[in-house]
Image (cartoon, helix red, strand yellow):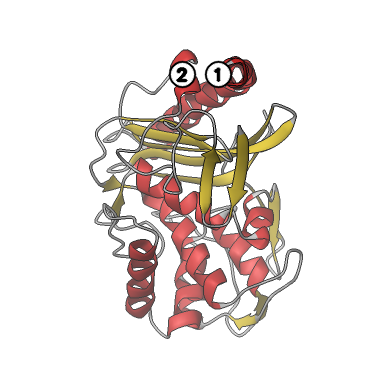
């Protein structure tokens, strides 16, 4: 079997013809045979989806109906910003001047924000970090206005991007995730995560452990509590009462001597409870999946591919 990881998708050629094609991670796709022997601990509620670079889908669980995704929305916000304003890895990117509205929205008791100062220049990279690491809603809205002139125009760009990625069950109505009317599925968000992680700058940003807000002297830790453990290198949290807890995660695992990117999405954990309770449930469900995959995937791959070579 020859395994290939390309920018157009993850796929396998040769060997077992039931492995997935370029649309890996989508609803209704075939699960790779090796996944059937892994007995993954899928969450008992909500929905989840997992895929492995160069291997394919490990499965999708739960009814794939659109549900609120809270701040997971910001993955698409960052994706659209970086498509319109590409950055090299480690580069500061363009210069953005914070407007008065972003400054006025810097402190809130009802949403997550990050402090910015009106009239101050910020690098594109720092604003993306402030949006993704502490999940600053005001920064997401500032970036949308900077890119498209107003938030409505930017939301239209988000929905066009979703359509281009084949995210047929996804609708964006805002840029931050505050709106419960922004809805998606685990399978759709997995498609987006794969596309976004192809960008080296995006990968660096979501792997950032902490970020300091310039001029404010405030340092924020990443809301993804799995980051830095069990090979986790990202990606994005999101929680609210209607959405429950949500987590898109990325980890790396060696399979047959090759380091593979493993991506997973867990949505709609404990909806109707507090954001803290939902977030804790999403982290726990994701941790269980990651632990099982890292423990079982190498052996499952050796068994499956060894049998294929013998055949």
Q: Which residue is more in the foreground, 61 or 206?
A: 61
Q: Quadrant of residue 141?
A: bottom left
On screen, residue 33 above or below 202:
above
Placement of the C terminus among the 4 image quadrants: top right
Determine whether, in the image, residue 169 is placed left or right of residue 281: left
Tell me if label 2 and label 1 are in contact, CB under 8 Å.
Answer: yes
User: Where does the image place residue 18, in percent across and percent down from the top left?
Assistant: 41, 31
| Residue 106 appears anywhere in the view | no
- Give the mark, 2 or 1, whose residue is nearer the N terminus: 2
Residue drawn at point x = 65 percent, y = 56 percent: 205
Name the image quarter holding residue 307.
top right
The secondary element bearing badge 2 is classed as loop
Left or right: 82 with respect to 205? left
- Vertical order, 117 against 178 (above or below): below
Q: Position of residue 94 (x, y in %)?
A: 66, 80
Callout 1: helix, strand or loop? helix
Residue marked by disc 1: 292
Q: Quadrant of the N terminus?
A: top right
Residue at 59% over, 65% down: 128
How many neighbours does mark 1 have within 10 angstroms: few (below 14), some (14-19), or many (20 or more)?
some
Q: Is residue 87 above or below residue 219?
A: below
> Residue at image x 31%, y 62%?
172
Q: Nearer the viewer, residue 294 or 118?
A: 294
x and y percentages locating residue 165 in the rendered image: 40, 59
View extreme (front): residue: 311
Q: Which residue is mark 2?
A: 40
Q: Nearer the viewer, residue 136 or 188?
A: 188
């Amino acid at each position: 079997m020859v395994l290939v990881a390309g920018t157009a998708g993850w796929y396998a050629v040769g060997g077992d013809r039931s492995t997935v094609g370029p649309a890996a991670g989508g609803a209704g796709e075939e699960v790779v045979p090796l996944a059937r022997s892994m007995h993954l601990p899928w969450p008992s509620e909500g929905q989840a989806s997992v895929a492995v670079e160069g291997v394919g889908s490990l499965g999708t669980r739960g009814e794939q109906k659109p549900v609120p995704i809270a701040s997971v929305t910001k993955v698409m916000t960052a994706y659209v910003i970086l498509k319109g304003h590409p950055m090299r890895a480690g580069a500061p990117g363009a210069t953005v001047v914070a407007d008065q509205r972003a400054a006025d929205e810097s402190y809130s008791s009802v949403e997550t924000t990050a402090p910015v100062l009106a009239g101050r220049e910020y690098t594109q990279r720092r604003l993306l970090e402030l949006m993704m690491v502490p999940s600053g809603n005001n920064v997401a809205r500032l970036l949308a206005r900077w890119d498209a002139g107003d938030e409505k125009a930017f939301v239209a760009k988000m929905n066009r991007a979703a359509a281009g990625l084949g995210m047929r069950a996804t609708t964006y109505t805002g840029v931050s995730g505050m709106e419960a009317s922004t809805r998606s599925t685990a399978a759709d968000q997995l498609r987006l995560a794969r596309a976004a992680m192809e960008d080296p700058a995006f990968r660096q940003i979501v792997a950032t452990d902490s970020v300091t807000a310039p001029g404010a002297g405030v340092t924020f830790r990443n809301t993804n509590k799995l980051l830095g453990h069990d090979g986790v290198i990202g990606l994005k949290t999101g929680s609210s009462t209607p959405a429950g807890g949500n987590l898109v995660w990325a980890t790396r695992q060696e399979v047959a001597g090759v380091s593979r990117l493993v991506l997973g999405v867990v949505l709609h954990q404990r909806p109707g409870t507090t954001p803290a309770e939902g977030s804790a449930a999403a982290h726990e469900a994701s941790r269980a999946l990651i632990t099982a995959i890292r423990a079982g995937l190498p052996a499952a791959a050796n068994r499956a591919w060894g049998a294929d070579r013998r055949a």
